[in-house]
């Protein structure tokens, strides 16, 4: 508990009123019923609201479509997972023995979930202003590095196919493996008479994105 309190002071700049709330935010369901899942549900909306307002203010002349492209990248599970690892969360996440042995505390799925659950806990314990300020502080390098609104690889592949009069890309999950808490998906994307690519990810969406990226690189 002292390690958690130190983390909250140093990283979240917050002295918790309810330390147990943050302990639950770091507890995976493999430990027991009192897991982070409800806080994750709340924190996902906290990050979404904070990011949407920030983008609306920062890019006042951009249309909704470009704002959405920025938003989707910034709140993605991959970005949340990367942020969580940078914050040092893998060492703090409470997992069952098997889940820890499987390395779940380093996966985008679990670390991304915990980032969201911590934001839910911070909202409850400190209010929206504190939670939003933390989002802006930690996500700032990711937003600053975007430049132009990024285009999601799946959208880019779809647009490339349309521009060249190709068939639409088709995605298929060819394999799913791993434990429930640390799944691995293999996805194949193909464009009829053009080519195909296969990639893996810790979620179906992640694998589809990686496969689309690979096929884009082949096609351009």
Image (cartoon, rainbow, N blue to C red):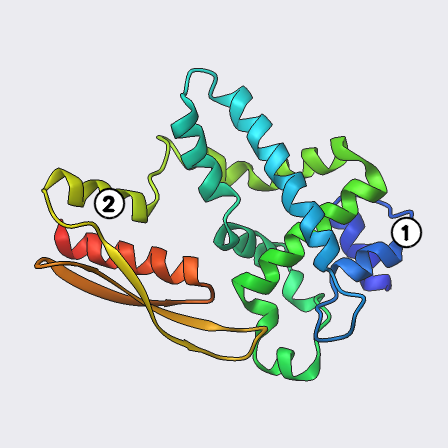
Q: Give the residue displayed 64% in from the left and 78% down from the top.
A: 100
Using the rendered view, name the quadrant where residue 33 is placed: bottom right
Mark 2 nearby-residue class (10 Å; few <14, some 14–19, many ≥20) = some
Above or below, 9 relative to 198: above
Above or below, 30 relative to 77: below
Using the rendered view, name the quadrant where residue 199 is placed: bottom left
Does 83 sit left or right of 216 as displayed?
A: right
Task: List the residue tagged with mark 1.
Answer: 18
Q: Nearer the viewer, residue 5 or 186?
A: 186
Q: Nearer the viewer, residue 57 or 179?
A: 179
Are dots 1 and 2 in contact, CB under 8 Å? no
Mark 1 nearby-residue class (10 Å; few <14, some 14–19, many ≥20) = few
Above or below, 49 relative to 181: above
Q: Residue furthest right?
A: 17
Using the rendered view, name the quadrant where residue 147 is placed: top left
Instruction: Say what secondary structure mark 2 lies in.
Output: helix
Does 62 sit left or right of 5 as displayed?
A: left
Q: Which mark is residue 70?
A: none
Instruction: Say what secondary structure mark 1 lies in.
Output: loop
Quadrant assignment for the N terminus: bottom right
Task: List the residue tagged with mark 2.
Answer: 158
Image coordinates for residue 104, horizontal then vertical, percent: 58, 72
Image coordinates for residue 164, horizontal then vertical, percent: 10, 42
The residues bearing labels 1 and 2 have C-alpha atoms spaced at a distance of 48 Å
Q: Give the residue displayed 78% in from the left and 48% down from the top.
A: 121
Q: Nearer the viewer, residue 206 or 150?
A: 206
Quick one: label 1 or label 2, which is nearer the N terminus?
1
Q: Nearer the viewer, residue 25 or 33?
A: 33
Q: Nearer the viewer, mark 1 or mark 2?
A: 2
């Amino acid at each position: 508990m002292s390690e958690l309190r130190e983390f909250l002071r140093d990283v979240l700049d917050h002295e918790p009123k309810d330390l147990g709330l943050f302990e639950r935010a770091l507890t995976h369901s493999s430990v027991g019923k009192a897991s982070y899942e409800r806080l994750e549900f709340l924190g996902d909306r906290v990050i979404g609201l904070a990011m949407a307002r920030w983008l609306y203010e920062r890019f006042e002349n951009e249309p909704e479509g470009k704002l959405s492209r920025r938003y989707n990248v910034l709140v993605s599970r991959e970005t949340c997972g990367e942020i969580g690892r940078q914050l040092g969360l893998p060492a703090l996440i409470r997992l069952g023995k098997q889940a820890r042995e499987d390395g779940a505390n380093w996966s985008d799925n679990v670390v991304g979930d915990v980032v969201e659950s911590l934001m839910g806990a911070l909202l409850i314990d400190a209010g929206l202003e504190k939670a939003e300020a933390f989002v802006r502080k930690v996500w700032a390098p990711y937003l600053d590095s975007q430049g132009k609104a990024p285009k999601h690889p799946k959208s880019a592949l779809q647009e490339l196919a349309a521009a060249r009069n190709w068939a639409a890309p088709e995605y298929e999950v060819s394999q799913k493996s791993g434990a429930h808490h640390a799944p691995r998906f293999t996805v194949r994307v193909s464009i009829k008479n053009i080519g195909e690519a296969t990639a893996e990810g810790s979620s179906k969406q992640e694998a589809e994105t990686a496969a689309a990226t690979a096929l884009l690189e082949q096609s351009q």
